[in-house]
Image: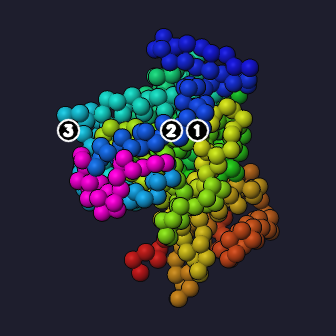
Amino acid sequence: MRAAIWHSSGSIERRTGDGELIWDPYHESMDIENRRGLQLRRLRETVARVAVSVPLYSERLRGAGVDPCGLQSIDDLRHVPFTTKDDLRDTYPDGLFAVPSEEVVRIHGSSGTRGKPTLVGYTREDVDLWSDVMARTLGCAGGTSHDVLQIAYGYGLFTGGLGLHYGGERMGCTVVPMSAGNTRRQLTLMKDLGATLLACTPSYALTLAEEAREMGMAAEDLSLRSGLFGAEPWSDGMREQIEAQLGLRAYDIYGLSEVIGPGVSAECTAQSGLHVFDDHFIPEIVDPATGDPMPDGEDGELVFTCVSKRCLPLLRYRTGDISRLDRELCPCGRTHARMTRITGRTDDMLIIRGINVFPSQIEDVLMRVAGVAPHYRIIVSREGHRDALEVEVELAPEMFSDTIRGLESLEAKIVEELRATLSLTAKVRLVEPHTVERSMGKAKRVMDKRQGE
């Protein structure tokens, strides 16, 4: 049974049988064929617009023989050329903007963790769209206008903080714009204000939990119900750790600055994949090596086409993120395509002795081993002509005083678990609690000493 609730803004909420909020039921629960028709209309309009307003797209679409009026179905997207982050860098600062400068009301940028930051622009309509998809995101995690939302993502050029901020205000939450850092103050205000929703990176959630223990604060002292965590890959094992330590339900959210920021997709309470808000962002999965489209259910590189943005409507943007798509209907009632949580990035993949290794695989192993803390560092180096993999992992506080024999046994167990998962042998070094550097934002877990050799 569903109940509808009108907002003073004129939008409508709809609750599923378990009380979950569907912020925009018309689009989120739209008949699939009707959504495909909406996608196609928006795609044609977008391609036609950038073909005359963005020189790079004018040239590429003409070279590929793509006529916007000739797009007969969403499947014709495969004929449209890809866009990459290098295109944004090569046309820096605003060469891909599709509107005149007087229509741009906001500039954000990527975090720059993989090179020169890229700048993205927003019109007023884009900011409004962003607010709506972020309200959908909060609804997926059970958020309502009665919630207190504490935002511990960074503000500024990074899109994380302001994206959640506008979504929270659109929903009617009480928003606490803490930004990242000031961990003790975060926890104090979290308790005093009765925050029910927490938004930050998963690694910072663990930092909050650790600091709370040192302050003598238990999960029961907080009012947290849901956490919205993203901006970095994380495993189900880390989810379990966060939920156990903070006493909340942890939801994965996904976004990237070039597409909109956070708000591209989000987990609902069914937690069977992230709903892609595909009335705005059409997803594809392609082979990372060839660029060929891959069928649903197979892992590959995630690609997005923006069909409703005004300033930066990217066509077939290659994200570098590894995922897969599922179009089966979700029990929550939403009919979007769903993507699996990100398992890694094409440029994060480590090739060690000819074997492809993703950091998320190592994290998943460590999170299953009792006696270690969820803080680790991966070090790759070269010994002679041979790659060497070392994993530094913190001991849990209760294990630090264990016997040498017990620690050797734990170390051997981790080595064996990694060998079984990765098909190669890694050196494991157990380190004291609080040894691995903590992150206030995106965690930097990999040190590849082979680079530059």
The kind of secondary structure element at disc 1 is helix
Q: Find residue 99 and report its image quarter.
A: top left
Say which residue appears at 66% left-offset and 56% top-offset: 297
Is 338 situated above or below 381? above
Say which residue label 2 marks: 37
Say which residue label 3 marks: 101
Say which residue appears at 24% left-offset and 46% top-offset: 53
Circles 1 and 2 in contact, beta carbons < 8 Å: yes
Say which residue appears at 24% left-offset and 47% top-offset: 52
Q: Residues within 10 Å of mark 3 (few under 14, many from 20)?
A: few
Is 441 situated above or below 192? below
Residue 64 on the magenta segment: yes
Q: Nearer the viewer, residue 152 or 332?
A: 332
Q: What is the residue that sits farthest to the bottom in this orientation?
A: 385
Say which residue appears at 48% left-offset and 11% top-offset: 8
The kind of secondary structure element at disc 2 is helix
Circles 3 and 2 in contact, beta carbons < 8 Å: no
Q: Quadrant of the N terminus?
A: top right
Say which residue label 1 marks: 33
Q: Mark 3 vs mark 1: which is more N-terminal?
A: 1
Kind of residue at badge 3 = Ser
Residue bounds of the magenta highlight? 52-73
Q: Residues within 10 Å of mark 2 (few under 14, many from 20)?
A: some
Q: Position of residue 347 (x, y in %)?
A: 48, 65
Q: Residues within 10 Å of mark 1 (few under 14, many from 20)?
A: few
- Separation of residues labelled 1 and 2 (CA atoms): 6 Å
Q: Nearer the viewer, residue 398 or 56?
A: 56
Kind of residue at badge 2 = Gly
Q: Position of residue 174 (x, y in %)?
A: 50, 20
Identify the main secondary structure in magenta: helix
